[in-house]
Image (cartoon, rainbow, N blue to C red):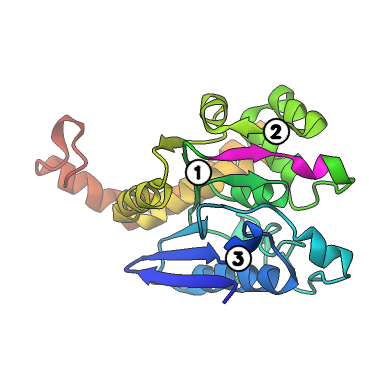
């Protein structure tokens, strides 16, 4: 199978499984990636999804050999991009039910995350990268533009100037530079990206989920709204969560839980 899906409690691990081609995405793989993330979104028992690649690679982007043969996925589904899930959005109100990503997605990156592979990594909320990770707009060499979110997400994550450096030059950005820029959120030894991502999502999945998802959605929605609209939306969406989860949480704190900043209880 070109895409593997594994369930570990409230966590789903989606693995691109084409190591012989550095996990480059052909048409079948793109369709399978879209389906895997859509299924994880629709499953109420799933809190967080991890996206990774097999064989020491994350993803080398679109499979240019298959593109050259005319083998591309031409998605008809709303929210789908050429590489599969890259046009899914974070605001449920703007999308079909069961398609939009309302839950955290973490990328575990070993080796190359380049061209469309970079764009898949940018879809994630956070990127856990091993010291082997390499990011870059390698498609610059072949006249293939970024059409899976790269020009939109990259400047928002690392800033316009650094994004232009990557977009215009196509140069490789190693794991240390990516970490210094905020492109990688965690930097770990070779071979440890998936394990570190699992540890991270285990922590995330422990939190009250409605509250976390409301804050996450507000952080994304603010990009497309004026400041006063974003502030109003934050309050409107967050206020019901205070009743749903916050009151009980405050009572737990009052009874002694979480003192001194502890996350253990």
- Mark 1 sits on what residue? 126
Rendering coords of residue 173 (x, y %): 63, 31
The span picked out in magenta is: 133-140
In percent of the image, x 72 and y 65: which residue is there? 80
In percent of the image, x 79 and y 29: which residue is there? 169
Q: Secondary structure at mark 1?
A: strand
Left-right relation of 50 to 152: left
Q: Residues within 10 Å of mark 3 (few under 14, many from 20)?
A: many
Q: Secondary structure at mark 2?
A: helix
Label pair 2/3, CB-CB below 8 angstroms? no
Q: Is residue 247 above or below residue 153?
A: below
Q: Nearer the viewer, residue 85 or 93?
A: 85
On whether residue 120 falls in the magenta region, the answer is: no
- Mark 2 sits on what residue? 155
Pointer 2 or 3: first along the chain: 3
On whether residue 138 falls in the magenta region, the answer is: yes
Left-right relation of 123 to 6: right
Which part of the image, by quadrant, shows the N terminus?
A: bottom right
Rendering coords of residue 163 (x, y %): 72, 30
Q: Secondary structure at mark 3?
A: loop
Q: Nearer the viewer, residue 24 or 154?
A: 24
Pointer 2 or 1: first along the chain: 1
| Label annotation for residue 18 | 3
The answer to whether residue 236 shows anywhere in this view is no
């Amino acid at each position: 199978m070109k895409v593997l899906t594994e369930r570990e409690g409230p966590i789903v691990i989606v693995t691109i499984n084409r190591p012989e081609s550095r996990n480059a995405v052909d048409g079948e793989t793109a369709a399978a990636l879209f389906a895997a993330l859509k299924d994880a979104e629709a499953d109420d028992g799933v809190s967080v999804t991890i996206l990774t690649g097999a064989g020491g690679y994350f993803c080398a982007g679109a499979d240019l050999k298959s593109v050259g043969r005319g083998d591309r996925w031409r998605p008809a589904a709303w929210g789908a991009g050429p590489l599969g899930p890259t046009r899914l959005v974070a605001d449920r109100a703007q999308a079909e039910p069961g398609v939009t990503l309302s839950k955290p997605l973490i990328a575990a990156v070993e080796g190359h995350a380049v061209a469309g592979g970079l764009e898949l990594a940018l879809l994630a909320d956070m990127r856990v990268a091993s010291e082997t990770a390499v990011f870059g707009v390698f498609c610059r060499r072949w006249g293939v533009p970024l059409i899976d979110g790269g020009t939109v997400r990259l400047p928002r994550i690392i800033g316009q100037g650094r994004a232009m450096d990557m977009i215009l030059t196509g140069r490789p950005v190693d794991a240390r530079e990516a970490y210094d820029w905020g492109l990688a959120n965690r930097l770990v030894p070779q071979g440890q990206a998936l394990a570190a991502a699992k540890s991270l999502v285990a922590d995330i999945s422990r939190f009250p989920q409605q509250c976390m998802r409301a804050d996450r959605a507000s952080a994304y929605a603010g990009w497309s709204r004026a400041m006063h609209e974003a502030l109003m939306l934050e309050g409107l969406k967050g206020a019901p969560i205070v009743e749903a989860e916050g009151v009980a949480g405050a009572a737990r704190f009052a009874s002694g839980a979480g003192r001194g900043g502890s996350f253990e209880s």
